[in-house]
């Protein structure tokens, strides 16, 4: 059995912790390493200088086309249509590609049809309201950031919808009668904070419930006792950042867990221990690092770097640029997989996270390849542009918080 020790492990090995080892027994690992290794070897041994280049025009064309019309193959995502809007709109924003006013207006009108009479957004017109497409719709509308976009959101009904999903233990259902997991708590906290409908009663007990989802590994599972997972861990920590209750977690244990999710060979991130690298975790895992960094820094941790996040930013950028770009536009999970809008969004989001260190006006860039690879920054809590977050919060702060949940 091969054992793998994460690179630069001593940087992340806090006092009292042992080095994490990942046993690799699946032939899938070898297949992925072989595919990725062939790409890295070709670049290293090429007789000509190969520029690491983000194919912006190809990706932009793929995204713009998807915003106008989708093929029949997307029928399986009929209940995820606000997600398609968000993934595409956010990706274009990261690429600094303007969205024509008429197209943005069409997106707003479509999302208005997805909003239900009882509050919240459904996966498509006439469907049941659900927290996941509600999060996607609010993010898409805040990214567009026009008066028309903001006016789509019925804040009073949205608050009613969130209240109807709240459980006595602080958790939230994903929809009426639906499952409970950390995603729902994050989606609820995200949309409530962006639209200024948060109340103490609405999130009473939520932070404590999320904290119970952290397990011995250090990461966060979907529900208490469940295996730690990158997506759930991001949702849990980001929700606690919004709720200002991150002190409830063992943050250094969480940091150690996520640090070892970066693959030493591929440079990208895996979602769980002993799983394969996946381009989408370029955001779900790497996006945790700014949240952890800022929280630990605020607590006075003097061991933190002042020039980079606590992962190998160069390695992640190399993996995305070399292994996750489709030659015809769009990004993907890993070599051999097909492109899709989901992976395009989260690969670009992770690439942006790896490029930009800091916050506000104090940003340090670490761009590998050509300077044109630089993307716009993304907010580590909401995964929309920091300027979009600030504009939305300022807009909705001018409106009174609905008092139904008080």
Image: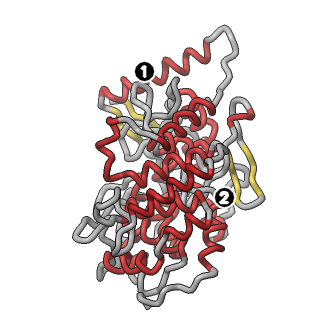
What residue do we see at 32% from left, 35% from top?
A: 73
Rendered view: 47 above or below 13: above
Q: Position of residue 157 (x, y in %)?
A: 41, 78
What residue do we see at 36% from left, 52% from top?
A: 80
Q: In the rendered structure, which disc, 1 or 2, sits on the residue that comes first in sequence?
A: 1
Rendered view: 337 above or below 84: above
Position of 341 with respect to 8 (left or right) is left
Q: Position of residue 66 (x, y in %)?
A: 47, 39
Rendered view: 245 above or below 372: below
Q: Residues within 10 Å of mark 1 (few under 14, many from 20)?
A: few
The one nearer the camera, 10 or 85, is 85
Q: Which quadrant holds residue 55?
A: top right
The one nearer the camera, 256 or 380, is 380
Q: Residues within 10 Å of mark 2 (few under 14, many from 20)?
A: few
Residue 267: mark in rendering: none
Position of 104 with respect to 387 (left or right) is left
Q: Secondary structure at mark 2?
A: loop
Can you name the residue that lies furthest to the top here?
47
Q: Which quadrant holds residue 54?
A: top right
Rendered view: 100 above or below 297: above
Q: Are marks 1 and 2 in contact (CB under 8 Å)?
A: no
Q: CA distance from mark 1 to mark 2?
A: 36 Å
Q: Pointer 1: what residue? A: 34
Q: Position of residue 110 (x, y in %)?
A: 44, 56
Residue 303: mark in rendering: 2
| Residue 136 visible | no
Q: Position of residue 109 (x, y in %)?
A: 48, 59
What's the colour scheme?
A: secondary structure
Q: Secondary structure at mark 1?
A: helix
């Amino acid at each position: 059995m091969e054992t793998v020790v994460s690179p630069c492990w001593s940087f992340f090995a806090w006092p009292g912790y042992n080095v994490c080892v990942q046993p690799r027994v699946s032939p899938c690992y070898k297949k992925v390493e072989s595919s990725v290794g062939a790409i890295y070897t070709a670049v290293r041994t090429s007789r000509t200088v190969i520029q690491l280049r983000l194919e912006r025009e190809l990706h932009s064309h793929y995204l713009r086309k998807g915003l106008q019309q989708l093929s029949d193959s997307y029928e399986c995502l009929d209940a995820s249509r606000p997600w398609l809007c968000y993934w595409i709109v956010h990706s274009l924003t990261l690429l600094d590609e303007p969205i024509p006013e008429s197209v943005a207006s069409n997106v707003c009108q479509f999302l208005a049809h997805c909003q239900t009479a009882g509050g919240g957004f459904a996966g498509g017109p006439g469907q049941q309201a659900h927290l996941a497409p509600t999060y996607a719709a609010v993010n898409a509308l805040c990214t567009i950031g026009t008066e028309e976009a903001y006016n789509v959101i019925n804040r009073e009904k949205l608050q009613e919808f969130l209240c109807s999903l709240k459980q006595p233990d602080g958790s939230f259902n994903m929809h009426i009668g639906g499952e409970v997991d950390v995603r729902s708590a994050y989606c609820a906290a995200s949309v409530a904070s962006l639209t200024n409908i948060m109340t103490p009663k609405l999130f009473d007990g939520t932070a404590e419930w999320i904290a119970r989802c952290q397990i011995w590994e250090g990461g966060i599972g979907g529900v208490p006792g469940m295996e730690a997972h990158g997506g759930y861990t991001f949702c849990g920590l980001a929700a606690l950042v919004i709720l200002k209750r991150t002190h409830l977690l063992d943050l250094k244990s969480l940091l150690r867990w996520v640090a070892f999710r970066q693959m030493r060979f591929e440079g990208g991130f895996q979602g769980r221990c002993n799983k394969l690298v996946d381009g989408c975790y370029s955001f779900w895992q790497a996006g945790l690092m700014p949240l952890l960094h800022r929280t630990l820094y605020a607590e006075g941790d003097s061991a933190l770097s002042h020039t980079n996040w606590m992962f190998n930013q160069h390695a992640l950028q190399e993996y995305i640029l070399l292994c996750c770009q489709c030659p015809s536009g769009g990004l993907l999970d890993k070599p051999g997989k097909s492109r899709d809008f989901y992976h395009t969004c989260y690969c670009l989001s992770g690439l942006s996270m790896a490029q930009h260190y800091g916050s506000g006006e104090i940003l340090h860039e670490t761009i590998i390849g050509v300077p044109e690879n630089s993307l716009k920054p993304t907010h580590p809590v909401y995964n929309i542009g920091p300027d979009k977050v600030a504009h939305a919060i300022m807009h909705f702060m001018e409106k009174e918080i609905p008092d139904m949940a008080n």
